[in-house]
Structures are given as C-alpha cells and as structure tokens.
Amino acid sequence: MKRSKLTISMDILRLIQNESGKAKPTRILYGANLSHNALKEYLDSLMTKNFIEKTSEDGHVFYKLTQKGYEFINEFRKIKRLTEAFGLSV
C-alpha cells in the first residue's frame, strides 16, 4: 500500500522526535524509507512549514523539530485517535 504524503511527513517528524528531537539526514533517509530526492523534497516542505529546522553541529548537519513540529505531532495524534474511534483511518 502506498503511503500518503501526510503519513510520510509524520514518519519523518516522529523519527526526529524519537532521536531526541534531532536527527542526521542519513538516519531520516533510512528510517523513513525514502529515496534521496524524495527525502530532500519532504525536508524542504517540512522546513517551509516550520515543523523542522536545519542545524549544524561540529560539521554535521541535523534536522531538529521546532515547537510547531512538536505541536503538530500532538494534534495529529488526537485526530488519529478520534478517527479510529469512528472506524476511520488517516
């Protein structure tokens, strides 16, 4: 079954959250099971929406969740619980 853009975006946000709020691009690439081009597209989109930000530490690039990103994850969980309670899926 093909994943929706929303599902892939949530996979990326949750992965970053589970890595203590920041993750290297390679970790995201493998964890979200995306091609390099698709990963870049999703990261750019999430940065444009201010859900994540790109940072650099000791010469390594990381993507960090913003406050808005954490809030989106929490709100999405509420929506998912609600839809599932009515037998629907997101």
Image (cartoon, rainbow, N blue to C red):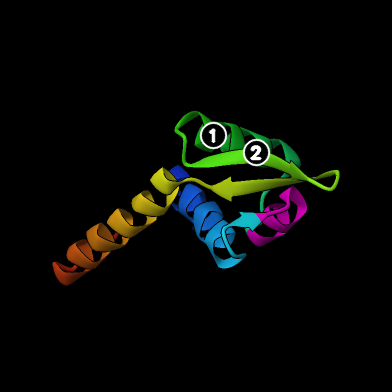
Looking at numbered disc 2 in the image, what kind of residue is underneath it? Lys
- The structure residue drawn at horizontal position 50% and vertical position 28%, both measured from the top left corner, is 48
Location of mark 1 (residue): 47
Secondary structure under tag 1 reads: helix
Judging by the rendered image, the residue that carries numbered circle 2 is: 54
Q: If the image is split into quadrants, where does the C terminus sit?
A: bottom left
Residue 22 visible somewhere in the drawing: yes
Residue 63 placement (x, y as % from top left): 64, 46
**At x 35% / y 51%, what residue is drawn?**
71
Q: Residue furthest top?
A: 48
Q: Amino acid at mark 1?
A: Met
Cβ atoms under marks 1 and 2 closer than 8 Å: yes
**Camera-side residue: 26 or 90?**
26
Position of residue 12 measured from the top left corner of the image (x, y, whole percent): 55, 53
Q: Outermost residue, right direction?
A: 59
Instruction: Give the magenta range.
Output: 23-31
- Identified at 36% across, 49% down, the residue is 72
The answer to whether residue 90 is visible is: no
Task: Locate residue 35: give its quadrant.
Answer: top right
